[in-house]
Amino acid sequence: MKNFIFLGLSIILFSCATQKKMVKTELKDNQTFLLKEISEDPSYGYTKRNPIEVGGVDKKEGPVNERRFLNALAEPNGEKITYFRAGSCCSFKSKNGFMGMGLLDNYRVSWIGSKDTVSIYINMYDYGELKAPSGFTIID
């Protein structure tokens, strides 16, 4: 009977475990992620529902990872961008957040010749595959 209960609990525990895809991020230098591709998803990074997941809170590097990501971006012609943090918004559930919750950070991005700033949403609590949002290029 004990073996049956143990087996039943084991099945429940392991069947409920979510399989999280391992995400490896590489650094170009200490202040810049090495990005290798541009997203084909037009909502990636531009919407609150599809933020860029840079992670880092678990290692006390959340804000640094946000800047590392933005430092890897270039404008459509490959020129340097500028950015500033406009604030936090949009609470969401995250096992890495405070009491199971996190907030997105909103950055405003622009470059010489742009008519307006572009809004980028970044999640520093969770890790995901990093790509440049569509409309941007990757810095050399």
Image (cartoon, helix red, strand yellow):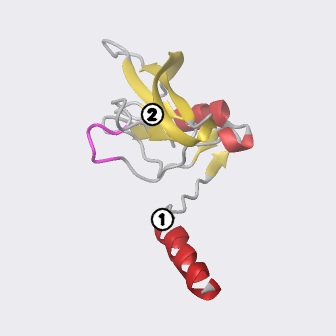
Q: Which residues are magenta?
A: 39-44
Q: Examine the image and state in which quarter residue 4 appears.
A: bottom right
| x, y percent for residue 85 | 54, 17
| x, y percent for residue 132 | 41, 42
- Classify the position of the N terminus by image quarter: bottom right
Q: Callout 2: few (<14), some (14-19), or many (20+) C-alpha neighbours within 10 Å?
A: many
| x, y percent for residue 60 | 73, 37
Element under disc 2 = strand
Q: Examine the image and state in which quarter residue 124 appears.
A: top right
Q: Residue at x 37, y 35 (%)?
A: 136
Instruction: Give how far apart the Cα atoms at labels 1 and 2 are.
Output: 41 Å
The answer to whether residue 72 of the structure is visible from this angle is no
Q: Disc 1 or 2, which lies upstream in sequence?
A: 1
Which residue bears the numbered disc 2? 74
Q: Examine the image and state in which quarter residue 57 appears.
A: top right
Residue 97 in magenta? no
| x, y percent for residue 76 | 34, 33
- Please identify the dominant SS of the magenta region: loop
Against 81, residue 76 (above or below) is: below
Which residue bears the numbered disc 1? 16
Question: Which of 26 and 17 lies nearest the eye of the viewer?
Answer: 17
Element under disc 1 = helix
Q: Residue at x 51, y 43 (%)?
A: 140
Against 79, residue 33 (above or below) is: below
Q: Amino acid at mark 1?
A: Cys
Instruction: Select label 1 or label 2 by which is in front.
Output: 1
Q: Residue at x 48, y 65 (%)?
A: 16
Q: Callout 1: few (<14), some (14-19), or many (20+) C-alpha neighbours within 10 Å?
A: few
